Image (cartoon, rainbow, N blue to C red):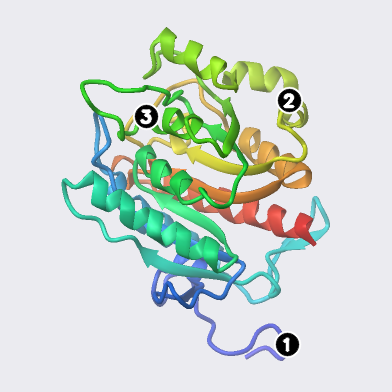
Amino acid sequence: MSDHGYETGRLNLPFVGVSTFAKRQLATDWSQINADVAVLGAPFDFGTQWRAGARFGPRGIREASTLFSFGHSGAYDHEDDITYLNENVKIVDIGDADIIHTDTKKSHKNIEDGVRSILSAGALPVVLGGDHSVNIPCVNAFSNYGPIHILQIDAHLDFVDIRHGVKYGHGNPMRRAAEKSYVTGLTQVGIRNVSSTAKEGYDSAKAMNSDILSVRQTRKIGPKKLVGRIPKDAKVYVTIDIDAFCPSIAPGTGTPSHGGFLYYDVLEILQYLAKQNKVVGIDLVEVAPDYDHSGSTTILAAQLLLNFLGFIFHNQK
C-alpha cells in the first residue's frame, strides 16, 4: 500500500464491488439525504414511441461510471489546472424510483417524490433516465423552487401537446414544462432534421418563450454565445437527451438522429453554463444500453455528468 495520504483503505478498482454512481455511497433512506449531489435512477420507458430499452439506462450509466472512480483525491484536469470533484463534494446514490409497469401516473409520481426528497435536503438532483417523459415529474418537483429556466440538449423538440390522447409521453415534456408558471423560458439546443414535433409545435414553443437552435446554428455561434442567450440571473435546470449526440458516438438510444453533437460541443456548453448560471437540477435520458454493445453510450453519459458536476461545484466555490 502506498504511503500517499489519499491512497488508504481498499484499492477498490472499477470492476470490483457494487455499481453505484461513480461508486459513491448508497443512501436509500430518502428522509436522511446528506449530500451536495443525490443521484436518482428513473428506469421508466413506457413513454417511447418506437424502440424501448431506456429502463436499463440508469443501471448502464452507473456501471459505466465506475470507470471514473479511481483514486480518492478528485479529478485533476491539466488543461484547466483544476482538481474537480475533490473530497469537499459529497455525492450519494439514492437508488431508483419504484416503477409500476404500465402505470405512467404512479411511476411518474414516484420519480417526483424522489426529486422532491433531494430538493428538500438541499442537494442537487441528478436523475438518470429512462425515456424523456421522466423530465415531467422532475420539473413538477420544482413547483416550490422556481423560477427556473430550462436548457434542453436534444435532437427533438419534444413539444407535442396531445397526440392520440397522450400527454405524458417522451414527445411531451417540454410542452408540459413550458406550461408551468415557474418555468420562465426554454433554450432548446441540437434540434434537427426530421423531428417528432410538427410546425405548430415549433410555433407554440416560440410563443411560449423558447429559443430553438440546431446543431449547425449552435456550432456557428459557439458555446459561449449560446450560453449568453440564457438570462444571466436565471436558475437553470438542464435536461440532456443522449440522442442530441451523433449516433456514431452514442448509438445506444431509442431514436437516433444523425448530424448530432460530438462530445466537446456539449461539454463546453455545460462548462460555460456553470460559470454563468446556478444549475439547480439535471436529468440525462434516453440511454438504452442494449443498442450499443460497445458501451460507448453509457460511458459518454457518465463522463459528461461527472465533468459537468465538477464544473458546477468548482464555480459554486
Mark 3: few, some, or many residues within 10 Å (few <14, many ≥20)? Answer: many
Q: Amino acid at mark 1?
A: Gly
Q: State which quadrant residue 111 falls in.
A: bottom left
Q: Is residue 123 above or below residue 238?
A: below
| Of labels 3 and 2, the one closer to you | 3
Q: Secondary structure at mark 3?
A: loop
Name the residue rendered at 38%, 28% in the picture.
256
Find residue 9 and report its horizontal and vertical position in percent: 57, 90
Q: CA distance from mark 1 to mark 2?
A: 42 Å
Q: CA distance from mark 3 to mark 2?
A: 28 Å
Mark 2: few, some, or many residues within 10 Å (few <14, many ≥20)? Answer: some
Q: Amino acid at mark 3?
A: Asn
Name the residue rendered at 44%, 46% in the picture.
140
Q: Earlier in the sequence, mark 3 or mark 2?
A: 3
User: Does residue 89 appear left or right of residue 215 in this picture?
Assistant: right
Q: Is residue 180 above or below residue 205?
A: below
User: Does residue 47 appear left or right of residue 273 in this picture?
Assistant: left
Of the numbered discs in the image, which one, if any, rests on residue 212?
none
> What residue does disc 2 label?
222
Q: CA distance from mark 3 to mark 1?
A: 50 Å
> What residue does disc 3 label?
172
User: Does residue 94 appear left or right of residue 70 in this picture?
Assistant: left
> What residue does disc 1 label?
5
Q: Secondary structure at mark 1?
A: loop
| Of labels 1 and 2, the one closer to you | 2
